[in-house]
Structure formats: C-alpha cells, structure tokens
Amino acid sequence: RMCVHHNRVQVVFLMLSVLHESVLRFVSRHRRQNFQRVPILARFSLSERLIMLASLILAMLFLSPPGGSNGIFTPFGVSAQNMSTQSKRKKLSLHNANHESSIRNIVQASFKNDAISPLKPGNHTSNVAIIVSSSRYWFNYRHVTNALSIYQLLKRGGITDDKIILMLADDIPCNMRNPFRGKIFPRGAYGGFGEDLMEGVNIDYSGTDVTVDAFLRVLLGRHLDGEGGDSLGSHRRTLPKTDENTNVLVYLTGHGGDNFFKFQDGEELTSQDIASAFSQMHELKLYKELLFISDTCQAFTMADEIDVPNVFSVGSSLKGQNSYASHTDNEVGQTVIDRYSKVIKDFVDDAVTVTSRGNVHANKYGVGTIDNATITVMERLNLFDALVRIPTTHGDLGPNSKVGHTDMLCSRRMNQVPLAAFFAAPQAERERQVRQLDGVVTASLWMHDSPLIPPNDSIETKPSFYNQQCIAETESVLPQLNASSDETHHQRESTGLFPLDLKFLAGLAGFIFCASSLSRMF
C-alpha cells in the first residue's frame, strides 16, 4: 500500500505538470492574440466550459483517497460521518458482509448476561478428533479442503496433532495436476499467495490406508498386531486413550447417499456402522460428549440409527438433498471448497476480525498453533449458531438444502454448548502449551475480550515432513514453474500498483484525456 501511495503522488505531480503546461499555452495565446478585457469564462465556448468542468470534477474525485474520509474532497451527497463509518467497515475485510451483524448480535453480546447466554466451558479434561476425507481423484479437491479447514480450526483452538487423526484418501496436495504443489487453498490461489491449509499439517492415514475398517478401529482403539500407537509417525496411529471425561469430534466429508458414506468409491460406511461404533464407545466409556458432523449429500441420514446419549449430530443436508460445492478457482481449475464447510470457516474468521476491532489479525505463534483470538470467539459461539443457524442463514447451501441436527438424547441443548467444547483444548491444556511457547500464563481466557498472550514473533511453525517431501519433489520435477512463480512475485513487488486497481487507472486515463483535449483547444 505504501508503494501504491507513492505512485499516486507521482501521478498527481504528472497531472499538475499537464495543467501547468495548459496554463502556459493559454497565457501565450492571450498575449499573442491580445484579447479584450472580458471575463475569462466568456472567452471559452460552451463545449470548452463543459470539458473544463468535467476535468475539475474528475480531478476532485481522483485526488480523494480510497475510502474518501481523509481526503480534501468527498463524493457529493455523502456526509463525512457516513464516509468515516463506511471506511471503518471496509477495513474489516470480511469474507461475507452479512456476517457482521450476526457476529455483533451473537458473539459480542454472548456473555453480557449469563441468563441470556448460559454457555459453560464444561468439565471435560481432554479433546480428541477424527477427520476423514474419503474421496479420491483430483476433481474432489474440495473434500480435502473441507477436512483441512476443520483441522486448522482445531489447531488454532489448541488441540495438538497427537490428539487429531487426519485421514485423506488421496494425495491431492502433491497431485501432478496441482499447479501449486504441496498447497491447498480454501478461497483461491491468488497466484500461489492465498491462504494455504497445508502449513503445519500431519497426515496420519492416506491412500489405501483410508478404509472403513481403519476408521472404525481408530474410533474403538482396536488395532491389529504391529499397528497403532499414539505417537506421531506410528503406522495406522490410534488416538490417545480416552475416557468418560473426553470430548470427541468426528467429521466426515466426501460422497454419500441415503444412510451410507462412500470410502474411495470402493466400500461404504453405513449409518448402522456409525451407530454400532458409537454404542460401543458409550459402553466402554470412551467419551463424555461426542459431536458428529457429516458434510455430504443426504448427510443427516448418517445419524438415523444413533441411539446413545450425549451425541450431537449435524448433517449439511437432509434426506433427498444434495450438498453443493462453493466456487471454482480458475488457477486451481477445480471447485476449492464445499458451501457448508466454507461458511463455518468464514464465520469464525470474520468473528475474529470483528472482535479484534478491525485490526489485521495474525497468530502470534505462527500457523497451525494455538490462537487466543480464535479461542475467545469459540467460547462465545454455541454449537447451534455455528453449525446450524449461521450456515442456514448465510451459507447459501443450495436449492432446497437444509442443515439437519439433533440433541435429543443429550444432557444439554446445542445452544448451551460452546464451540470451544469440541474445537478447543481445555483450559489446563492451553496453559501448558502457552508455557511452552511463551513461558508465562497471566490469566484465563474464559470470558475475556482481548488476547492475553504477549507477542512472540520469534516462534515459527515449520512445515510437516509430508509437506517438505512434496515441496522437494516439486522443486525437482517442476523447476521452471517455481522460477516463473518467483519472477512473478518479484515483478509484483517491483511494481507499486495492485493489478486490480481498475478505478484508479480509469480515473487517470480519463483525466489525462480531458486535460490533453483542453490544452489543444488553448
């Protein structure tokens, strides 16, 4: 932006020089033709006056900075106060402008009165999560993005990799068709500089290891001889030992239908399989509360057979309904995310932006680590609003698609459970992480408005071994692509103008045209 401001100053000097030349021509013409002493405007024809007026108006609008609130001139009919308000709203840079009112009504007002918003942090002692993307092939890029969006929210909530099982059925990030090897973009590539969900990712199951049998064994902790182990890098790793004080999140994304969910187009996980697994977990006391989310066609039918207590079930579509993709990125060449998962991610990100008072938010500890601002939002946002109400209201889920949910056998309703109960680590675990990262914990984050962790810019998150391997392979196979990308990045840094600043360029062209036409008439 500093470069753009510098170029704008140069252009203003250019316009002033054009006007100066026009004035000199006018004075020279006046002396040469010895005009009579009449008013200056009377010496110009009507068309010349109109051109001068248009040039003046265009110059006034052009000299006003973007936003208009700090410049000498403001657009006609708009008060300075309104311009200031609009400028502040623009600075928020929300992914969905409709989120702002919901965030202010739901998130910011959550803890003003406990009787109105009785959210409690819960008394569970640990969190674990199982995230599954069961689709293969390049055209299912969006399913990997769905899974990684949820994964990154968990990491920002302080849930570490040893308590997350991530299953990706296909190696989409390193697919040869991916123009940005080793990267996954949820909103768009933007020349390779968009938000990358692969930063800091650890994948536990990939390729042919992602099966129905492996998924059920992870849920129940029943691995075959030579498999399992809860340390990172273990073959067919299992979750840490859970008990009746553990909150469990199960997230499925891929292709499905009425009471079934497909694994790699070769086998199916049925609603009876899910119900049986959850029933065994209940009998073995492997969870305190369980949140089951399915993002697929006819997703909510996967919860039809669940009949055990304290299982919150959410599906992105009802029976006979589809779950639709969001948008296509031309650089990637595929739809990059599904609508339901996108609105959850966008709303949490927008809530962090709004509650940070419009300041540019960056995680103090790097990508893929605990983030206080995100946790603060999750503690104020209940499950019903985050997973049902907001996607239904702002998600544009598609023709006749609705979110299904149930909490019938649960001890508390979804609107009484904070999102942090499943997407953030317990307070004691967060404090332990903070001590490792920063050394000092000053207070609890619960019901505080601002981040409490002091900044520490020296901590960086290194990419996982998987990501490094993919990047190394990319550099050896596609050196020309990397060189062209570096060259493009260098060119963008050397040119101060943003490529999409069309209004600025159009105004400049119009001003130069009018000024040159006026100077020729002199």
Image (tube, rainbow, N blue to C red):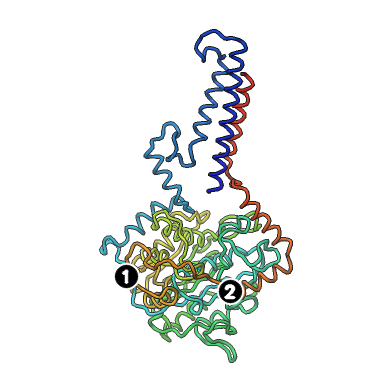
Label 2: how many residues lie within 10 Å, few (<14), some (14-19) or many (20+)?
some
Residue 441 rendering spot, x and y as whole percentages: 36, 73
Outermost residue on the top side: it is 36
CB atoms of marks 2 and 1 within 8 Å: no
Q: Position of residue 288 (x, y in %)?
A: 39, 79
| Residue 173 position in % (x across, y down) | 63, 67
Q: Earlier in the sequence, mark 2 or mark 1?
A: 1
Give the Cα separation between the discs numbered 2 and 1. Answer: 35 Å
Q: Residue at x 59, y 27 (%)?
A: 515
Q: Nearer the viewer, residue 252 or 357?
A: 357
**What kind of residue is marked 2?**
Ser
Between 346 and 179, which is closer to the camera in this rendering?
Answer: 179
| Disc 1: CA contacts within 10 A as few (<14), some (14-19) or many (>=20) | some
Give the answer, above or below, for where 405 lies relative to 40.
below
Residue 192, above or below 224:
above
Q: Quadrant of the C terminus?
A: top right
Q: Nearer the viewer, mark 2 or mark 1?
A: 2
Q: Residue at x 59, y 38 (%)?
A: 505
- Residue pointed to by mark 1: 120
Residue 391 visible somewhere in the drawing: no
Q: Mark 2 — residue?
A: 464
Task: Classify residue 519 by image quadrant.
Answer: top right
User: In the picture provided, is 183 more to the left or to the right than 415?
Assistant: right
Give, as a three-letter code, the residue at label 1: Lys
Q: Secondary structure at mark 2?
A: loop
Q: Is residue 483 above or below residue 246?
A: above
